[in-house]
Image (cartoon, rainbow, N blue to C red):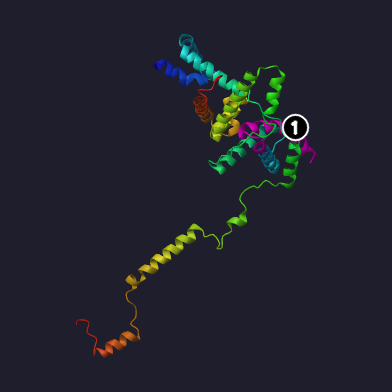
Amino acid sequence: MNIMCVCVENMLDLYADGRLAACQARWVERHLASCPACAGRAASMRRLVSALRALPVPPPPADLAALIRDAVVSDRVPAGPDPELYHEPFPARTPSLSLAFGFLAFIFSLSSSLLGPGIPGPVWAERVSQAGSFDPGK
Amino acid sequence: MADINRLIETHSGKAYLAAYRLTGNQADACDLVQETFVRVIRKAELYDEAFDFGGWLQRMLFRVYLNGRRAQGRRREVPLETPEGECCPLRAAEAAAGESPEKISEAAELREKLSSALNALPPELRACVVLVDVEGHDYGQAAEILGWPVGSVSGRLFRARRLLRDMLRRVEGI
């Protein structure tokens, strides 16, 4: 298989469907006339298409029209998944609400470092009185 | 309801032909045709009487098929045996036409291998083959029915034919 055969092989589908420009089609025809291998491939493709067209289809069931009418009347073909199967116990949260919650949680985690230890409670005062006097330098 | 009955009587046969070629068996073809008619009737208010109902039905059929296959993923159901009556009438007709038993057997084998190869194609490729090679539509019509650009139809058809030729390389008569 030479380079010409490779080019023609890739163009055979379009040639068979009549989608090549006239000059390209003439070029393919000239090559097919001189190359038995490519002519064989083209013939094989034609046989494949004609065999596909000749594939038999069995007759439809006698009650096909009645089945369609029943389906249309009762509209029994499901349009999508049953919503009950996908019922969520909690209402869906919107992305903006989730972002707001996340931001509040972040601020809360930072609050101890931002606000300090807070106002001293009674336990702190008791410890200070036991120590005698509060001297931060000791 | 009389209009719906008339549409079903007129178009169900052609829809069944396309559905059988897409699905490869009678039961799935009937289900596909039913589902397509149900969807068409649901969307009846969108239909403009100036347009061809058959073309609209065909577009809907192919889209229902492709969406259904996507939903099923890669799962394939192949019947273990050919249902009674799906191939026998043709063999009987060939026998009645005076064909020799060998020729009848060879033709049946070719049909079986061709059907298997067609069934093995991915749904998108198969839809292109059915529209262009089997039903004889041109690329533009196939692209309109499938809702794809013409280049996509052309590329998929090229791949489908290549796959079919590879699968049927050793089959006599192809």
**Residue B119 relative to residue A117: left or right:** right
**Residue A60 relative to residue A91: left or right:** right
Up-down relation of residue A23 to residue A130 (above or below): above
Residue picked out by circle 1:
B10
Looking at the picture, tell me which residue is in the foreground, B31 or A95. B31
Q: Secondary structure at mark 1?
A: helix
Q: What residue occupies the far right of the structure in this picture?
A: B2
| Location of the N terminus of chain A (image quadrant) | top left
| Location of the C terminus of chain A (image quadrant) | bottom left
Q: Disc 1 residue type?
A: Thr
Residue B165 placed where, x, y %? 51, 24
Residue A89 placed where, x, y %? 56, 63
Looking at the picture, tell me which residue is in the foreground, A43 or A82. A43
**Residue B92 relative to residue A92: left or right:** right
Residue at point 45%, 64% (across, down): A101
Residue A110 placed where, x, y %? 35, 68
Q: Is residue B141 visible?
A: no
Tag count: 1
**Badge 1 density bin: few <14, some 14–19, many ≥20, Cα 10 Å:** few
Give residue B172's quadrant in the image: top right
Give residue A88's quadrant in the image: bottom right
Residue B117 placed where, x, y %? 55, 29
Q: What residue occupies the far left of the structure in this picture?
A: A138
* Region of the chain picked out in magenta, as a range: B1-29
Residue at point 31%, 88% (across, down): A126
Looking at the picture, tell me which residue is in the foreground, A131 or B109. B109
B95 inside magenta stretch: no
The secondary structure that dominates the magenta segment is helix
